[in-house]
Image (cartoon, rainbow, N blue to C red):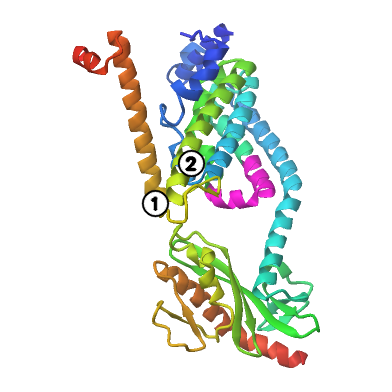
Amino acid sequence: MSGNGGSDVTSGQRVLPQASSQRPEVPSWRLLVTLGSAGALAGLLLVFVYYLTQPAIQAYKARMLREAVQEVLKGPQRWDTLYVYEGALTPQPPADVDAASLEMVFLGYGADGERLGFAISGAEPGFQDLIELIFGYDPQAGTVIGMKVLANKETPGLGDKIVKDSAFVAEFDGPQAPLAGVKSGRATGAANEVDMITGATISSRTVIRIINNRLERLRPILEAYLEEAS
Amino acid sequence: MPRKTTAAQDFRRGIWRENPVFIQMLGLCPALAVSNTVLNSLAMGLATFFVLFCSSVLVATFKKLIPAEVRISTYILIIATFVTVADMTLEAVVPEIHKALGAFIALIVVNCIILGRQEAFASKNTVPRAMIDAVGTGIGFIIAMLMMGTIREILGYGTFLGFPLFGGNYEPWIIFILPPGGFFTIGFILLGLNWWERRKLERARSGEPPVGVAVGRAA
């Protein structure tokens, strides 16, 4: 064993400067075969693992989305998935369009079939990276009914309070849209005010901005859909 | 030239005396970046252990078939494959931890601990010896990650594995879960280890226990 080890050391370390004099040059087909077969085997293994793990990964993503819609629409009985296609909402996009690539909103219904509101997702850069969130919007009352941050990389202990500070999250239960962020202690009691977090001004402002921007863009589409449906 | 080491020495070496993080100073990127909680540290340690072990076994098995000219590319290919396997498995089994570790799982590919063990050991030794070496080094990395993670989580969150350790009055040192906290933690650990090593060395040299005397003679 130690003999093998010794010769390998020599070949490994001296092969570049003295390749021609010390040992016959390795033909390039051997290099190609080595890398080619290693690559092919690696590819096969990865395909296998991909098929094993993908169902669990997809199921987790679907469950996260389900829980988020449940939370921001305050427990709907059921909901429809609607696609934004050519400036209008449609439950069924044309067959030649990839549904997964379209924007989606979710229309939730209560126990008596009444419409609770739309769950809308959005993402914009926060303090560190994209903040992704989903929020509930009641078009009849024009109010935001709930907000849940789906992904963020904000500073732990400061910016991540947009997730962990339950008082801030509760601020999004019922304010009139469009929202206006106010510093804590400066609230005047207006219906569209949301108290921002001290120490997380940029992160909380981003959350408010995402909701306002998404609503500004989607509100006409949502209202048109409701009028048509009713 | 070949070192004559016993299997037990191969095993113990990586754990402490040549600990990959604290002594060899390799793998510092994950050790600093994702050691902010004990759970993240453990997950990163186990993922690295898995990749190191599987790569060492494969490299030791096929060492005669791999021409020296393409050995590094082949090692990286093998390592990258197992990293991707670990990445997908973590995402399927523990998605929350996978999210917290983020890009650092993919970055195990460029972790010098793993490539270093292939080049320095697995490619020159039998499969069982490569396994023993990989297990020792892997455990050494896990120990280092856990030390970092424990210190940073206790100081930075006031918790251990998520359980609160102090009363509600504890004000966590947020700096310890931020990047600078990683540098502080590893700095103080290295300071302590070096101080300990030096003291041991000086005591051994003098052959007497009292510190003051030993220092005097050494000087």
Residue B100 belongs to magenta span? yes
Q: Which mark sits nearer the N-terminus, 2 or 1?
A: 2
Amino acid type, residue under disc 2 in the picture: Gly
**Up-down relation of residue B105 to residue A26 (above or below):** below
Local SS, label 1: loop
Q: Picture coordinates of residue A189 (x, y %)? A: 47, 88
Which label was assigned to residue B173? 1
Q: Which residues are magenta?
A: B84-103
- Considering the image in quadrants, where does the C terminus of chain B appear? top left
* Residue that numbered label 2 is attached to: B149
Tell me which residue sits at (46%, 77%) in the image: A195
Label 1 marks which chain's residue? B
Residues packed near mark 1 inside 10 Å, few (<14), some (14 to 19) or many (20 plus): some
**Up-down relation of residue B179 to residue B59 (above or below):** below
**Up-down relation of residue B169 to residue A27 (above or below):** below
Tell me which residue sits at (76%, 80%) in the image: A109
Label 2 marks which chain's residue? B
Q: Report the front residue among B37 and B159.
A: B159
Amino acid type, residue under disc 1 in the picture: Trp
Q: Picture coordinates of residue B63 (x, y %)? A: 61, 20
